[in-house]
Image (spheres, rainbow, N blue to C red):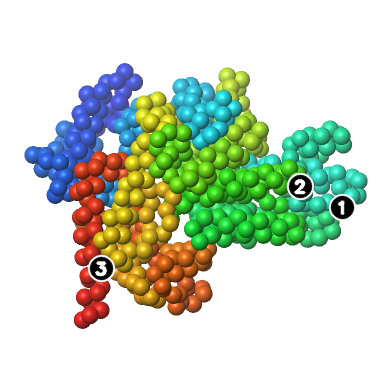
Amino acid sequence: MTADPSRELVSSYFPGARSEGERRLRNEIDATLDHWFRWRSGRFEDSASNDAAPASGAPLHEGDRLGRRLLTLCDALTAETPTFSPRYIAHMKADLSLPGLLGWFAAMLHNPNNSSRDASRVGSVIETEAIAALAGMLGYDPAQAQGHFTSGGTVANFEAVWRARYRLDHWLALALHISETDGAPLDPFAAAHMGWNQFRHLQTLYGVPDDVLKSCSAAASNPGDVWRRISRASGRDYRGPIMLVPGNRHYSWSKSANVFGLGGEAIWSVALDKGGHLDLANFERQVERAQADGRPILMAVAVAGATETGAIDPLDRLYDRLDLWRAERGWRIWRHVDAAYGGFLRAMLDGPSEATLAPETAAALRAMGRSDSITIDPHKLGYVPYACGAFLTPDAEHYAVSAFDAPYLDRPELGDGKWSSTLEGSRSAAGAAATWLTAETLGFGADGLGALMATTVETRQAFEAAVREAVPEACFLPADSNIACFSLARAGEALSHSNVRTQAVFDHFQRSPHFAVSKTTLGADNAALIANLLSGHGGYNDRSEGDAGMLVIRCVFMNPYWSDSSVRHDLLPRFIEELRRALAGPDEAKAA
């Protein structure tokens, strides 16, 4: 070491203030890319030919610690899941697009922090433009829409809860103050859905200052004290708001109830119909129950692209019902669509690609622009690197949320920095840049990403048709998108028997190096769907009510390379052959 070891560390491990380490960084990146490309090209025996041995070619500076450990890392990563391959149809993960990869890489080199304009002069502008591009695709007015990028769909869903609570809390706090002032009974359900126009009218009429409003707020004051006051004013025990979330919900909704202190009981599950979608009749009954119990509805959630099945809830019919209640009863219930996976399918609308979708699916996607907030994950069907989610609202009023002070950021030059309106403080601009470059090149229209989305749906349809014809045991769930789910059952068979067979087939694929699939279990929320599937092959449910789940194989066809007809021609027969071998295994064991 030199007399000043820090200088040696800086010269060895940083690019240099004047790019002194340029050649070193270029060499290491080139060598790392060589290593990565050789791994990809040699991963499967039928991959593109490459004379070089897989995973060979070390970083050039293997004589020093960084080069050696980088090579160790590259070698270790050759055991990573090959999600770039069309053979990988297990989960919502596929290869990255070049715009996504290069946009992410370009921004990552500058490492901007989108907490404020001061910390990200260009990155924050790129974020605004990328949000506008997403908004246009999702049915919002790009000139009015607001939003920001998150680390993923979970945080984006949390952002929706935060804003819905901000709105509901304001309305209920004002009504509580008026009730305590006038002595009139408080109706928590009606008050919590009054709307901003009524709120502003009453606040002006009663001259309620912000500090008084804050003292009546469960979010800004003491929630236990405020809930006791609501109970006194309403003449009944107030048990807090609830969220109506369909049975195909993501696990993040249960997390949100915990994080925001609502409690698990506040998640009211809406049943699914026989197609695996939100059941509107059950939804209406849940709303009636909430009204009868004096429980405000913090938000009504629908799903566009369910994690398990890819199902898309009937947003159009759900929003028609909410619009009717708004007109007839004055209820303004926050409507959020969790489109983390399926949001990009909306790019298929208004072009030839739309014909690939069922009419009811297209109608549901078209209604997305009527939502109060939307979650979407560019790191899924946007083909950009992790971690990149996004949260959007139609305008600034819906985007409003509690304000927080940060003196070290409180400077005029920060402009409209988002640090005070996002749950995450520091946020990378890399995901926004990746999404921006994707929008500027591939495009989010029907002739761009929409055309690619159509090929993924068509691949799922071709897969389903081929497997149905070749494997009589395959019983497919109804499908809206590019996810295919099926059990392996025989005519008149009990559910427990088909579950054993399906598990054995999945275990075979787990051992196989040729294809990767996933599995999921349809639970009690999918009772109508399970009954519908069993009736299709004369099966019956022989399991106890608490253990009546149906196991299904899950295949996600989001990989862009399936769009090549030669890939389908090659791999679909291979998959069917593998499936037949998997089925023969349990049958031979049973015969023995």
Residue named by callout 3: 583
* Mark 2 residue element: helix
Q: Residues within 10 Å of mark 2 (few under 14, many from 20)?
A: few
Q: In the displayed structure, would residue 284 be above or below residue 155? A: below
Q: Position of residue 201 (x, y in %)?
A: 82, 34
Q: Is residue 104 left or right of residue 61?
A: right
Q: Nearer the viewer, mark 1 or mark 3?
A: 3
* Mark 3 residue element: helix
Q: Earlier in the sequence, mark 1 or mark 2?
A: 1
Which residue occupies the extreme left position in the image?
51
Q: Residue shown at 29%/41% (left/top)? A: 563
The image quadrant that residue 512 belongs to is bottom left
Tally of marks? 3
Q: What's the residue type where badge 1 is placed? A: Pro
Q: In the displayed structure, would residue 264 be above or below residue 105? A: below
Q: Is residue 220 left or right of residue 182?
A: left
Residue named by callout 1: 185
Alpha-carbon span between mark 1 and mark 2: 18 Å
Q: Position of residue 368 (x, y in %)?
A: 55, 40
